[in-house]
Image (spheres, helix red, strand yellow):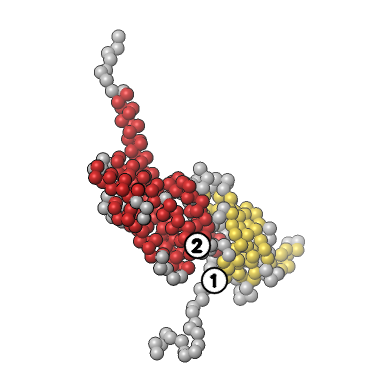
């Protein structure tokens, strides 16, 4: 028997993860999860007059690094705790608390957490935290360009996003698959616009027309797999449509919620990258057309001053 194997009849012992930082918990752990926290509390002094009469433990409120969606920021910024409704920990077995964080840059965006905390008893600074929820919802924001591409499937996409944020892999995958299959025509229509902008041949444009009319996703992808414009290829050589098809095909045989979650995350990321590339390509074309129009309006023989 392998030395790493457990004794016969005894369950194999798996290594438990150690305690994590409170800031990391707030930033990266989705709702409905509990973690052991290494720095849940900070120590303070109790004064009587000018003399220290004792010490107390207070809930730690570390700075956290989150995406700020305000027009001024629109990127990762530090958020600092603005208020909380409980400052002590360890005196009770557990406490339900709310934390409110504010963007330190624009001072406009906020993030609120609903938690349940308890002292672990291992060390005075250690504890456990359970995240009930947060507002705005956990996870990076969904790009507006992707929502625009999805049109009438955006609600299904956002439902899948909520499932993904809560670790529900099968639910997230099912929603994302519905989105891709129902928006196949819309995605191909936008890709066709880019192909037309690049003066694709009539034969290539005919393939895109056939693909849009095809009801089966796999057949439509196969028709245009070699006709995708270079500017839309991910990492310069990966066809986003074949990547999506590969993920959707694997998901039909996925056996675990975890594997479905990995596939769902991949589908979302590829969709977001494709939406970004489509928007950039069409925007550049629109800007070029506008520039040409301006130059043409000003074209003509130069008139000499009277």
Q: Regarding mark 2 in the picture, which secondary structure is present there?
A: helix
Q: Which quadrant does the N terminus fall into? A: bottom left
Q: Nearer the viewer, mark 1 or mark 2?
A: 2
Q: Residue at x 41, y 54 (%)?
A: 181
Above or below — where is 3 with respect to 260? below
**Residue at mark 1 to residue at mark 2: CA–CA distance:** 29 Å
Judging by the rendered image, the residue that carries numbered circle 1 is 19
Q: Which mark is residue 299?
A: none
Q: In the image, residue 117 lies at what x, y percent?
A: 64, 66
Above or below — where is 108 with respect to 175? above
Q: Residue at x 52, y 73 (%)?
A: 18
Sequence-wise, the earlier of marks 1 and 2 is: 1
243 or 300: nearer the eye?
243
101 or 245: nearer the eye?
245
Q: In the image, residue 206 lies at what x, y percent?
A: 28, 45
Q: Which mark is residue 171?
A: 2
Q: Quadrant of residue 295?
A: top left
Report the number of numbered marks.
2
Above or below — where is 198 with respect to 142? above
Q: Regarding mark 1 in the picture, which secondary structure is present there?
A: loop
Q: Which quadrant does the C terminus fall into? A: top left
Label 1, residues with CA under 10 Å away: few <14, some 14-19, many ≥20: some
Q: Residue at x 61, y 62 (%)?
A: 132
């Amino acid at each position: 028997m392998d030395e790493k194997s457990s004794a016969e009849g005894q369950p194999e012992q798996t290594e438990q993860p150690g305690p994590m930082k409170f800031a990391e918990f707030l930033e990266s752990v989705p709702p409905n999860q509990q973690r052991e926290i290494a720095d849940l509390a900070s120590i303070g002094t109790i004064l009587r007059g000018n003399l220290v009469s004792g010490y107390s433990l207070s809930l730690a409120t570390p700075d956290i690094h989150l995406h700020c969606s305000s027009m001024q920021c629109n990127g990762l910024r530090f958020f600092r705790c603005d208020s909380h409704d409980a400052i002590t920990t360890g005196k009770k077995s557990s406490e339900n608390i709310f934390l409110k964080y504010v963007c330190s840059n624009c001072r406009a965006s906020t993030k609120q957490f609903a938690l349940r905390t308890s002292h672990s008893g291992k060390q005075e600074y250690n504890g456990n935290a359970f995240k009930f929820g947060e507002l705005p919802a956990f996870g990076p924001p969904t790009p507006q360009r992707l929502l625009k591409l999805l049109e009438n499937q955006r609600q299904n996409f956002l439902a899948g996003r909520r499932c993904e944020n809560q670790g529900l892999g099968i639910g997230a995958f099912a929603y994302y698959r519905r989105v891709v299959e129902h928006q196949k025509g819309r995605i191909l229509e936008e890709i066709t616009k880019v192909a037309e902008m690049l003066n694709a041949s009539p034969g290539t444009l005919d393939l895109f027309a056939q693909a849009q009319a095809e009801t089966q996703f796999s057949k439509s992808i196969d028709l245009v797999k070699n006709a995708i414009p270079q500017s839309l290829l991910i990492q310069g050589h990966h066809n986003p449509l074949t990547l999506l098809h590969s993920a959707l095909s694997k998901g039909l045989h996925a056996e675990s919620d975890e594997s479905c979650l990995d596939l769902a995350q991949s589908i979302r990321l590829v969709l977001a990258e494709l939406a970004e590339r489509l928007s950039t390509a069409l925007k550049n074309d629109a800007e070029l057309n506008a520039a040409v129009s301006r130059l043409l309006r000003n074209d003509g023989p130069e008139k000499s001053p009277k």
